[in-house]
Amino acid sequence: MTAIPENNVQVRLAGPEHVNILVDFNLAMALETEKLGLDDSLVRAGVDAVLTGKDLGFYVVAEYTGRTVGGLLITYEWSDWRNAYFWWIQSVYVSPIYRKLGVYRAMHRYVTLEARRRGGVCGLRLYVDKDNQVAQQVYASMRMHQARYDMFELEFDLRPESGRE
């Protein structure tokens, strides 16, 4: 398949009708990038929470010839230093046969334009696996640069049956 002209990729806000494909994308992305099998019902509840609650963020989907071929999630981080929001690009997924054809580029362009249209957004951020050179090159081609920050985390197991804190 050759490159898809960007105007043939339709990018829009996701709605409740996209819940199944977004769950599928999240499950596939976790398995592909981290060899991690996720709980379908937990992912479904998480996707649904975003789609039905405007304060958590929003999903964007890319469609080509009527088929949803990509998606990503935007969440918000308040910056008191800037008195504005950073939008975090998360859960990026493009169906394998549509990769390297401009689908992510179209979604990134949509998100950038939407951030400027809405206002109050001081920048876009994302995290990428240190070994994922392909993704890093794609993000660099979108004029993104490696930030000066390293990421640290402490995860909590929220499953009721776990009995752990």
Image: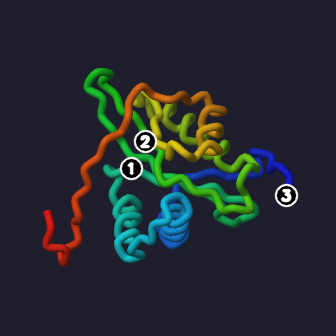
Q: Secondary structure at mark 1?
A: loop
Q: Measure how far apart labels 2 and 3 are at the Cα level.
A: 30 Å
Q: Residues within 10 Å of mark 1 (few under 14, many from 20)?
A: some
The image quadrant where one finds the C terminus is bottom left
Q: Comparing marks 3 and 1, which lies closer to the viewer?
A: 3
Residue at x 19%, y 74% (from the top left corner): 162
**Mark 2 or 3 closer to N-term?**
3
Q: Comparing marks 1 and 2, which lies closer to the viewer?
A: 2
Q: Amino acid at mark 2?
A: Trp
Relative to 158, residue 132 above or below: above
Q: Please give left or right for residue 72 compared with residue 54 in the image.
A: right
Q: Which mark is residue 57?
A: 1
Residue at x 15%, y 67% (from the top left corner): 164
Q: Secondary structure at mark 3?
A: loop
Q: How is the image coloured?
A: rainbow
Residue receiving disc 2: 88
| Rendered image quadrant of residue 41 | bottom left
Q: Residues within 10 Å of mark 2 (few under 14, many from 20)?
A: some
Q: Amino acid at mark 1?
A: Gly
Name the one closer to the observer, 26 or 156: 156
Q: State if disc 3 and disc 2 touch (CB < 8 Å).
A: no
Residue receiving disc 3: 1
Of all residues shown, which one is farthest toward the top?
Answer: 81
x, y percent for residue 89: 47, 44
Q: Amino acid at mark 3?
A: Met
Q: Secondary structure at mark 2?
A: strand
x, y percent for residue 57: 39, 50
Q: Measure how far apart labels 1 and 2 are at the Cα level.
A: 9 Å
Name the one closer to the observer, 118 or 125: 125
Q: Measure how far apart labels 3 and 1 are at the Cα level.
A: 33 Å
The image quadrant where one finds the N terminus is bottom right
